[in-house]
Image (spheres, coloured by chain):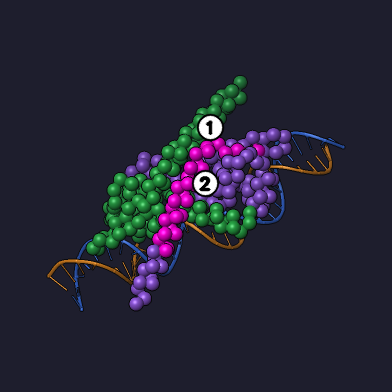
Chain colours: A purple, B green, C orange, D blue
Amino acid sequence: MDPTTRTYYEAKSRIFKALAHPTRLFIVDELARRERCVLDLTEMIGADMSTVSKHLSILKGAGIIDDEKRGTQVFYTLKIPCVLNFFTCVADVQESVIEDSRSALGQMKGDAK
Amino acid sequence: MDPTTRTYYEAKSRIFKALAHPTRLFIVDELARRERCVLDLTEMIGADMSTVSKHLSILKGAGIIDDEKRGTQVFYTLKIPCVLNFFTCVADVQESVIEDSRSALGQMKGDAK
DNA sequence: TTCCTGTTTGGCAATATAGCAAAATAATGG
DNA sequence: CCATTATTTTGCTATATTGCCAAACAGGAA
């Protein structure tokens, strides 16, 4: 892979990395419903607020969410809703994994003669 | 987050994790074109074959690609082509990041009076 | 100013991931 | 059987990510 190609895929992988955490996927789903402040999300998630704040800054750094300070609170919103389309395909992938394990089980039964 | 919800998002994040690496994104793109054996991919990527093999097993474990042994070689194929749809949206996210940095630059220029 | 609430940042230990090299495994052809 | 080719697994070190705590920071109210 030449350096240009490598840079190309590194940039794309940064966005996948940002989404590659259960808490951050939850945040994306929740922000798809409505804007939320850090305290709201912290209570829903049940982790330390500093942890949630760090997750939010990762999503923001990737360009997936936006923040807006109003008074003492910071409200986050989903900036790029198309990431939700990922989830449909992810469900397809999960389906295929389930089918695989079913057919693997079938194989095992067949093997035990 | 209750345990069931956590499990739900952990399962989804596994698929994002599998895609969250430049080499693995390259592999997905390449397998979208045609099937490839490990040696092919290793030469294109320019890493150790054991490294490429591990990336392939991660993608396979996530259910994204399939393998088929023919003789002494193992050919890999893209199993769930919809992951390619991700890439369009990823491009949108990248666009928005570029716009952000442009407007940040504008801010700076405006600030320096 | 000081206090209070909401949020971010820094430090640090635990865990996970990446990649190379060497050893192990698999299929094929003498 | 042995040798060869293609691939995977193991062992290891280096690097990155995670999450808590404590400290710092930013408004707003008294």
Q: Can residue A59 be found in the magenta stretch? A: no
Kindly identify the residue that appears in the image at 53 percent across and 32 percent down.
B100
**Residue at image point 36% right, 40% down:** A4
Q: Are marks 2 and 1 in contact (CB under 8 Å)?
A: no
Where residue B100 is drawn, which disc sits there?
1
Q: Position of residue A49 (x, y in %)?
A: 67, 49
Q: Is residue B21 visible?
A: yes
Q: CA distance from mark 2 to mark 1?
A: 17 Å
Image location of residue C2, percent across then percent down: 84, 41
The span picked out in magenta is A75-102
**What amino acid is labelled 1 in the image?**
Asp
Q: Position of residue A16 (x, y in %)?
A: 48, 46
Q: Are marks 2 and 1 on the same chain?
A: no
* Letter of the chain that mark 1 sits on in the rendering: B
Helix, strand or loop at mark 1: helix
Q: Is residue C16 left or right of residue A74?
A: left
> Principal SS element in the magenta part?
helix
Horizontal and vertical percent for residue A60?
56, 40
Q: In this rendering, would D4 be left or right of A6? A: left
Q: Mark 2 packing: few (<14 Cα in 10 Å), some, or many (20+)?
A: many
Q: Quadrant of the N terminus of chain B?
A: bottom right
Q: Is residue B107 above or below residue D24?
A: above
**Label 2 secondary element:** helix
Chain ID for label 2? A
Residue type, mark 2 in image: Ala
Which residue is label 2 attached to?
A18
Q: Is residue B80 above or below residue B73?
A: above
Q: Residue at x 48, y 42 (%)?
A: A85
Q: Quadrant of residue B105?
A: top right
Is residue B18 at all visible to an observer of this figure?
no
